[in-house]
Image (spheres, rainbow, N blue to C red):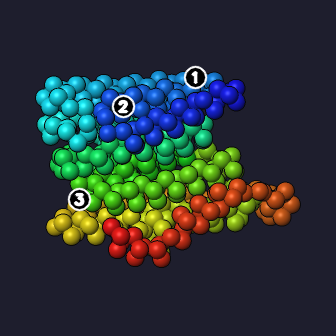
């Protein structure tokens, strides 16, 4: 892609999300979503092949449908209240806006498009889809948290955690596994949104850091499936160890960073007399942990069939240079749990 064109597209993608974040006017929010969509399509089709084109078309159709629902609810709200501002949204229209945002997020039961679209994209485009593209819809749900329908949010949250775990069990492609992981994490964020939206922000930030770190490792080692990932111990044992720790953190095991959002969500649900919901979510989270452990097993605990003289290949390969950002994000993704009292006291 032409560097100037690429700069313009990424600038448009960034400005679309920022416009959604800073606007209190429904029309500007809708324009921000459309800018974001129009910029994302060229990023998805940066590699000219039928699979990426198919993914771009699927993504466009889903996002356009969600935008139509959003514009319909905005128009009805304008007729009912005479206001364009987000704070003057009629409570009757909140479920329609919620459903449109769930479609944009890829949360259950509107999740089926996300794994297929993520699988058809290059690693960089897939990372943007599963990280940056979550920010704008979550910000709208954050703005409307006081008028959200609790029943819709809880049903979507439980379905997302359950289907995100089950869907990832039998996968061999890393991008599909990360897409199902994204669906499950969206469930945790949606569950707490009605009670304490600030915890949702912490959850989102930690999820973004861990996902970006994992995609950086995949990109650095040019791996897209479990079979190619199983050779990592031979080429870079240290990176295999780091990958295992980040996957355990993503699964929510203490004393790693990923335990913090699950702990805070469960604690807040129990405080609001919803202990059964917290118990079900924690039990369903074990399904996610299983396929993370499956990845760790194939990466670190199995020896890929090879000749004896290639078992210690890492000694003879050229030393890999890892980006500084990946190292910093890896440390944060693993070792931030000691800072949890600060977050708990603040929120």
94 or 262, nearer to the observer? 94
Circle 3 packing at 10 Å, graded few (<14), some (14-19), many (20+), is: some
The mark nearer the N terminus, 3 or 2, is 2
* Image quadrant occupied by the N terminus: top right
Tag 3 near tag 2, CB within 8 Å: no
Q: In this view, does 334 lie above or below 298?
A: below
**Above or below, comparing residue 49 to residue 118 in the picture:** above
- Please say if 259 is above or below 198: below
- Of the two numbered discs 1 and 3 in the rendering, the one whose residue sits closer to the viewer: 3
Question: Residue 85 lies in what quarter of the image?
Answer: top left
Q: Which residue is drawn at 35% across and 57% down?
A: 200
Instruction: Give the quadrant of the C terminus.
Output: bottom left
Q: Residue 313 location, x and y as percent?
A: 81, 60
The mark found on residue 28 in the picture is: 2
Q: Nearer the viewer, mark 3 or mark 2?
A: 2
Measuring from the top left, give residue 109's x and y in whole percent. Answer: 29, 40
Snapshot quadrant of residue 6? top right
Q: Residue at x 39, y 38 (%)?
A: 20
Q: Mark 3 points at which residue?
A: 195
Q: What element carries label 1?
A: helix
Along the polypeptide, which appears first: circle 1 or circle 3?
1
The local secondary structure at tag 2 comes to helix
Residue where numbered disc 1 is placed: 50
Disc ID at residue 296 = none
Separation of residues labelled 3 and 2 (CA atoms): 28 Å
Which tag, 2 or 1, sits closer to the chain's start?
A: 2
Give percent across and percent down for residue 68.
30, 24
């Amino acid at each position: 892609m032409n560097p100037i064109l690429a700069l313009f597209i990424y600038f448009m993608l960034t400005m679309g999300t920022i416009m959604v974040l800073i606007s209190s006017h429904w029309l500007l929010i809708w324009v921000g979503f459309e800018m974001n969509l129009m910029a994302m399509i060229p990023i998805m089709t940066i590699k000219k092949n039928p699979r990426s084109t198919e993914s771009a078309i699927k993504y466009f159709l889903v996002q356009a449908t969600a935008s139509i629902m959003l514009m319909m609810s905005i128009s009805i709200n304008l007729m009912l209240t005479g206001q364009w501002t987000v704070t003057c949204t009629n409570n009757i229209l909140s479920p329609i806006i919620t459903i449109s945002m769930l479609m944009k997020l890829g949360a259950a039961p509107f999740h089926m498009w996300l794994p297929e679209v993520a699988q058809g994209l290059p690693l960089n485009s897939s990372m943007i889809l599963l990280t940056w593209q979550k920010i704008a819809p979550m910000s709208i749900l954050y703005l409307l948290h006081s008028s959200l329908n609790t029943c819709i949010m809880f049903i979507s949250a439980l379905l997302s955690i359950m289907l995100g775990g089950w869907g990832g069990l039998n996968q061999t492609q890393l991008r599909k596994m990360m897409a199902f992981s994204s669906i499950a994490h969206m469930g945790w964020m949606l569950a707490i949104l009605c009670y304490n939206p600030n915890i949702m922000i912490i959850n989102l930030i930690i999820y973004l850091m861990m996902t970006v770190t994992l995609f950086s490792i995949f990109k650095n080692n040019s791996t897209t499936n479990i079979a190619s990932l199983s050779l990592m111990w031979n080429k870079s044992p240290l990176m295999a160890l780091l990958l295992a720790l980040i996957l355990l953190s993503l699964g929510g095991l203490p004393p790693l960073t990923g335990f913090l959002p699950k702990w805070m969500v469960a604690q807040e649900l129990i405080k609001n007399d919803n202990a059964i919901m917290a118990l079900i979510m924690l039990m369903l989270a074990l399904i996610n942990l299983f396929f993370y452990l499956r990845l760790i097993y194939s990466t670190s605990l199995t020896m890929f069939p090879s000749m004896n003289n290639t078992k210690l290949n890492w000694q003879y390969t050229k030393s890999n240079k890892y980006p500084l950002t990946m190292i910093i994000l890896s440390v944060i993704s693993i070792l931030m749990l000691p800072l949890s009292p600060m977050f708990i006291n603040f929120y």
